Image (tube, helix red, strand yellow):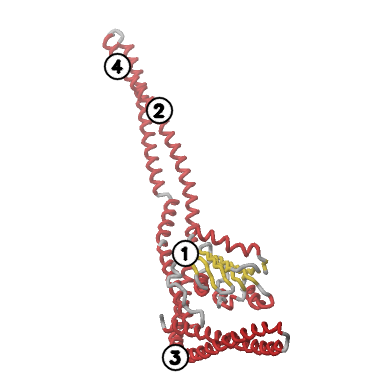
């Protein structure tokens, strides 16, 4: 345990002892008054009838008990006075240590202010990069639609080309079959020419006619081959066109740029982790320098790193709330038992530091005569305030990413609660967070 924590516990112990001393002194005075009243009652009853003698003995026994209690309380008071004197000496020693620590904290706060300026500059760069990424995403969506349209047109054209190919192949097959038929006829005519010498002139004429027909068919076949070559050339040009389509080139260029930008989210994540680390250190410095009864006692070391955890004290809950509220992006819903708890637990600085673009909702028990000034301040900062009288809850919901609920015991000021950033648990806890906003009375 550090010296500062010992100092805080010692100061809290002194405060408790002083309160006990005051209570004991008050009890002694009360006993004295009762003894005096009983003495007067005894004197009065002594002159009464014999019937009152039993009452007199009873009151004497009570007076004896009270006198014994008084002596015990006086001894306890003397002991507490001695303890308070000893604690006061230790408090003076710790006061000197706190003064030295405060000087060291002042130097660290100056360093943190410098880091905060640097972080602000980084935030501006992050916002600029986010806008560029969003612009690239919009362009990519447009190009995706254009690509889909182009692919549909390409498939339609390819289907048309395939149909034409089939038709040409069918024509080519018919031409080849016709050519084979002509060749067969030529062979038959040649055979007839050899067999019939006397019909030489007629056969020669028939052969000439067949040759002309064969030449015609050969010409058709050549044209068909040329058409096939033309179709192949068109296919090659279409393939080349697909590969070098301006839309696809543009799409690939956008994808390349997006891939180049893919390293940006990693940088953003590093910046956010660095911010969270520095903010955590700032919270620790602030809590260490304030003193009083709101020390680090009861706060787990890994409270800010857990995905799901529980609260066992008000100090742990308030510290965790402050840390999470420093990272709000879009919306926040906060529930407090009383509006005055904002000042009681020093939440005003954290709440008023929320960006203007954040939707801020607060539900709590509002007393206009007591909370008027704070209520006006919240309204001026665009907080939507809901008056809900029945709540005994501390609750928080941020960006649908984290939710926390704690049950508050007003008599002991104890809290028992749970928090989580697990999506399923967040949905469940958010239902409890929404209830006061639905049933309460909206004040603006």
Q: Which of the 4 image quarters holds residue 115?
A: bottom left
Pair 3/4: label in front: 3
Pair 1/2: label in front: 1
Q: Circle 2 is placed at which residue position? A: 171
For residue 242, side relative to residue 362 (left or right): left
Residue 357 shows in the view: no
Between 27 and 135, the residue placed more toward the observer is 27
Q: Is residue 160 above or below residue 142?
A: above
Between 183 and 44, the residue placed more toward the observer is 44
Secondary structure of the residue carrying numbered label 4? helix
The label on residue 187 is 4
Between 353 and 235, the residue placed more toward the observer is 353
- At label 3, counting other C-alpha atoms closer than 10 Å, the crowd grade (few under 14, some 14-19, many 20 or more) is few
Q: In which quadrant will I find the C terminus?
A: bottom right
Q: Circle 3 is placed at which residue position? A: 93
Residue 67 shows in the view: yes
Between 347 and 315, the residue placed more toward the observer is 315
């Amino acid at each position: 345990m550090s010296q500062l924590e010992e100092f805080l516990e010692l100061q809290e112990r002194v405060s408790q002892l002083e309160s006990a001393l005051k209570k004991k002194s008050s009890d002694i005075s009360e006993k004295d008054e009762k003894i005096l009243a009983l003495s007067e009652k005894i004197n009065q009853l002594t002159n009464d009838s014999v019937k009152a003698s039993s009452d007199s003995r009873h009151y004497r026994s009570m007076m004896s008990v009270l006198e014994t209690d008084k002596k015990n309380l006086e001894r306890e008071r003397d002991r507490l006075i001695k303890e308070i004197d000893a604690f006061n000496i230790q408090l003076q020693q710790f006061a000197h240590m706190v003064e030295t620590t405060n000087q060291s904290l002042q130097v660290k706060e100056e360093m943190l202010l410098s880091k905060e300026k640097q972080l602000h500059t980084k935030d501006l760069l992050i916002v600029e990069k986010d806008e560029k990424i969003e612009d690239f995403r919009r362009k990519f969506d447009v190009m995706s639609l254009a690509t889909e349209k182009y692919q549909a047109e390409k498939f339609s054209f390819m289907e048309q080309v395939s149909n034409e190919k089939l038709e040409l192949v069918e024509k080519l097959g018919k031409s080849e079959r016709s050519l084979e038929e002509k060749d067969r006829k030529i062979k038959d005519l040649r055979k007839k020419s050899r067999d019939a010498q006397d019909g030489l002139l007629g056969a020669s004429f028939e052969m000439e006619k067949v040759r002309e027909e064969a030449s015609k068919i050969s010409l058709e076949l050549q044209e068909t081959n040329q058409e096939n070559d033309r179709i192949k050339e068109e296919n090659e040009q279409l393939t080349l066109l697909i590969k070098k389509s301006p839309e696809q080139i543009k799409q690939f260029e956008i994808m390349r740029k997006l891939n180049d930008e893919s390293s940006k989210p990693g940088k953003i994540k590093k910046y956010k982790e660095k911010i969270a680390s520095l903010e955590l250190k700032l919270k620790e410095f602030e809590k260490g320098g304030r003193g009083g009864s709101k020390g680090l006692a009861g706060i787990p070391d890994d409270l800010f790193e857990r995905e799901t955890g529980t609260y066992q004290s008000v100090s742990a809950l308030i510290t965790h709330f402050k840390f999470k509220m420093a990272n709000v992006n879009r919306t926040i819903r906060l529930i407090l038992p009383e509006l005055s708890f904002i000042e009681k637990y020093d939440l005003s600085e954290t709440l008023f530091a929320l960006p203007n673009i954040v939707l801020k909702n607060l539900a709590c028990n509002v007393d206009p005569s007591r909370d008027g000034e704070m209520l006006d301040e919240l309204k001026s900062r665009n907080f939507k305030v809901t008056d809900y009288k029945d709540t005994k809850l501390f609750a928080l919901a941020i960006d649908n990413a984290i939710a926390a609920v704690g049950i508050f015991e007003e008599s002991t000021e104890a809290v028992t609660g749970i928090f989580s950033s697990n999506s399923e648990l967040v949905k469940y806890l958010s239902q409890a967070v929404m209830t006061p906003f639905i049933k309460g009375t909206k004040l603006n």
